[in-house]
Amino acid sequence: MDINNDGQISRDEWKGKPEVFDRIDKNRDGSLTREEFGSAARRQAGRLNQMDANNDGQISRDEWKGNPKRFDSLDANGDGVLTKEEIRGGRQNRP
């Protein structure tokens, strides 16, 4: 995402929702540092691990607590489970 390679992600470089950028930008300076972005990624990974009740590295439909339509949109191969890669890919492709 860091198009100009300055070590930060500016609002112009951000492809996600503005409210997510605002939530990650802890110091409210209008750019995301590696630390801010990494911290958000670690929190997301923690939430995914919490959802994975049986610790099989996947989120089944039964483990999913979100919107069923969102589950379906993330399940790229249609196998009824979400891998961390599918979730990461879906988050990157969100408008």
Image (cartoon, rainbow, N blue to C red):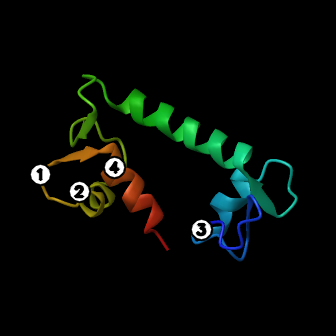
Asked whether 93 or 1 is in front, the reply is 1
| Label 3: which secondary element | loop
Q: Which quadrant would residue 77 be assigned to in this image? A: bottom left
Residue 85: image tag: 4
Q: Secondary structure at mark 1?
A: loop
Q: CA distance from mark 1 to mark 4?
A: 14 Å
Q: Position of residue 27 (x, y in %)?
A: 86, 49
* Residue lying at the far top of the rendered structure: 54
- 35 lies left or right of 92: right
Name which residue type carries label 2.
Answer: Asp
Is disc 2 in contact with disc 1, using a CB cutoff of under 8 Å?
yes
Q: CA distance from mark 3 to mark 4?
A: 20 Å
Crowdedness near tag 4: few (<14), some (14–19) or many (≥20) residues, C-alpha within 10 Å:
few
Q: Nearer the viewer, mark 1 or mark 4?
A: 4
Residue 43 placement (x, y as % from top left): 57, 36
Mark 1–mark 3 distance (CA, rounded to whole Å): 28 Å
Mark 3 and mark 1 in contact (Cβ < 8 Å)? Answer: no
User: Quick one: which residue is furthest to the bottom in this view?
Assistant: 12
Q: Mark 1 or mark 3: which comes first in sequence?
A: 3
User: Which secondary structure, mark 2?
Assistant: loop
Residue receiving disc 1: 79
Number of the front mark, 3 or 4:
4
Task: Left or right? Give the position of 23 relative to 62.
Answer: right
Residue 30 numbered tag: none
Q: Earlier in the sequence, mark 2 or mark 3?
A: 3
Residue located at (68% from left, 61% from top): 21
Q: What label does residue 75 carry, if any?
A: 2
Q: Residue at x 66, y 49 (%)?
A: 37
